[in-house]
Amino acid sequence: MWFGIGLFRLLILLPWSVQLRLGRFCGHLALLFLRERRQVVRVNLRLCFPELDEKRLRQLASAHHQALGIGLFETCMAWWAPKHRLPKFEIVGREHLEQARAAGKGVILLTAHFTTLEICGRVFSDAFSMGGLFREPDNPVIAREMHRGRIDKMIPAVPMNDLRGLIRALKDGHTIWYAPDQGKKTKFSTILPFFGIPALTNTATSRIAGMTGAAVVPFFGQRHADGTYTLHILPPLTDFPTADADADALRINELMAEYIRLAPEQYFWIHRRFKRRGRDHQNVYPQKPKKRRKANPRPTAEKQTSRGS
């Protein structure tokens, strides 16, 4: 693992255009070797884009894997590169965040899981003070680098399952990165349409906003073909939250889908977005074949005799 870290620290010294090509190549390798995840991507795209024929679906899946490969290099740049070496960015809608902050309360920086997550987070942190949620990696080497490159720069950094810490940070007036689009089975989840398909959906956003008085400001990052980026900061959600948490969550799903369609290959389709939907909904993902357990051989007559004796 340390060898890999050292290798990528060297690779990010290359021009950004070369890193983009290397990223696409890594994506092609992933497309070839990650068979199970390749199937997950195809299922997700087929469900969410039924208007696409098989050829266009294959092209979109290939573009997504290339985006994943580029995302690897974006992560390395975000964690280790000095500010002057980052790709060119444009921030659109800066005034919306400044307006929300001027109210003196916390801000929920609402987004989704895109392959551009790390590089956009770095640029956002450089431009504004920002906290966020994080999940501790299992690998200690990756955990160390993630802390140095991302987590230690968050003001504040809140563990993913620390709801009280999140609420406290928002009440203290912090801006917190928050992406509720990867459904987890909790007391704050229900089944709602995502791209018109029933999906496990987090309904906690409106509850958190209601408890803290925080403004909900959506933002989405987009990678362009020339290797430049745009961060779109939208106006704070109006009439939010309402008394209907499900309606609020559906509104967020629809907003996410709108921005995903602008660059669909850059969304994190490798995630099983339509899992854990309960018995009322079909399991859409291929199941791993269960390994047969080897039956314990019956003891031979000789062993039986020895045991008996």
Image (tube, rainbow, N blue to C red):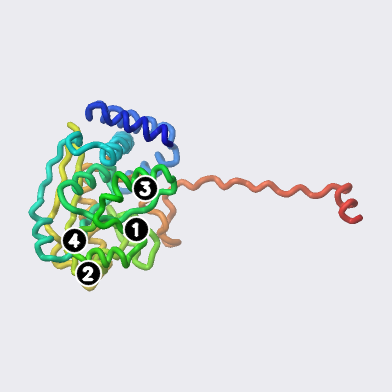
Between residues 50 and 24, which one lies in front from this camera angle?
24
> Looking at the image, which residue is at 20% across and 42% down?
222
Query: Mark 1 and 3 residues: CB-CB less than 8 Å, in contact?
Result: no
Q: Secondary structure at mark 2?
A: helix
Circle on res. 212: 2
Q: Earlier in the sequence, mark 1 or mark 2?
A: 1
Q: Which residue position holds label 4?
A: 107
Q: Which tag, 4 or 1, sits closer to the chain's start?
A: 4
In the rendering, at what x and y percent does residue 303 appear?
86, 49
The Cα atoms of the two marked residues, 4 and 2, are separated by 9 Å
Residue 7 picture location, percent across and down? 36, 30
Within 10 Å of disc 4 (Cα), the crowding (few <14, some 14-19, many 20+) is many
Dividing the picture into quadrants, the one containing residue 11 is top left
Residue positioned 13% across, 64% down in the render: 238
Quarter assignment of residue 120: top left
Q: Residues within 10 Å of mark 2 (few under 14, many from 20)?
A: many
Of discs 4 and 1, which sits in the foreground? 1
Tag 3 residue: 271
**Is residue 236 something one can see in this rendering?**
yes
Task: Indicate the amino acid at tag 3.
Answer: His
Q: Quadrant of the N terminus?
A: top left
**Residue 60 appearing in the image:** no
Residue holding disc 1: 159
Name the one closer to the observer, 40 or 221: 221
